[in-house]
Image (tube, rainbow, N blue to C red):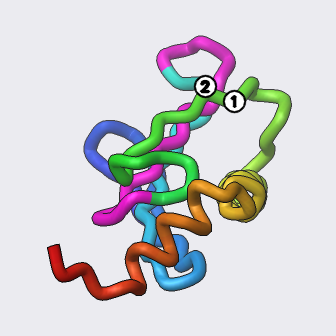
Amino acid sequence: MAETDDGYEMFVLEWTEFKIQVAYQRNWFNTGNWHIQLQCDEPLPVTSTGYRSIFIADDQLIDEADVKEMVLNMLNEAATSKDWQRHLDDRRQLKLF
């Protein structure tokens, strides 16, 4: 775990073959919400750009372990979609055109 200049805690999550930088801040701007940011160099099942910003009510999470569990559950659930499975197939397939 590392802390950024803007007060976010960060860790790298390895999910399947992807390395995802996760930054989070509890009580973001005194709103009573966690702010969680996912960043990856490639699309993920929860974002076609590799970036996702998520807000979760403060009482839903306690610590970094909860953040990791929530992100993993979200990724695993989204990864079952037909669109994501198609994306993975296309990614593995050589493109000639």
Q: Farthest front residue? A: 97
Using the numbered discs, state the Cα–Cα distance from disc 1 to disc 2 in whole angstroms: 10 Å
Magenta stretch holds residue 36: yes
* Magenta residues (range): 29-43
Using the image as rendered, state which of residue 82 and residue 16 is in the foreground. 82
Q: Which class describes the residues within 10 Å of circle 1: few (<14), some (14-19), or many (20+)?
A: some
Pinpoint residue 80: horizontal percent, then vertical percent. 74, 62
Q: Which residue is drawn at 39% across and 40% down?
A: 7
Residue type, label 1: Ile
The location of residue 19, given as percent across then percent down, is: 43, 75
Q: Provide the secondary structure element on which disc 2 rests.
A: loop
Q: Which of 57 and 89 is in front in this view?
A: 89
Q: Residues within 10 Å of mark 2 (few under 14, many from 20)?
A: some
Where residue 42 sits, quadrant-wise, is bottom left
51 vs 55, nearest the viewer = 51
The residue under label 2 is 27
94 relative position to 44: left or right: left
Residue 56 - label = 1
Residue 93 screen position, x and y as percent: 38, 85
- Circle nearer the N terminus (1, 2): 2
Q: In which quarter of the image is the C terminus?
A: bottom left
Q: Judge whether 79 appears above or below 50 on screen.
A: below
Quarter occupied by residue 81:
bottom right
Query: Is residue 22 located in the magenta-colored stretch of the structure?
Result: no
Q: What element carries label 1?
A: strand
Q: In this view, does 9 lie above or below 84?
A: above
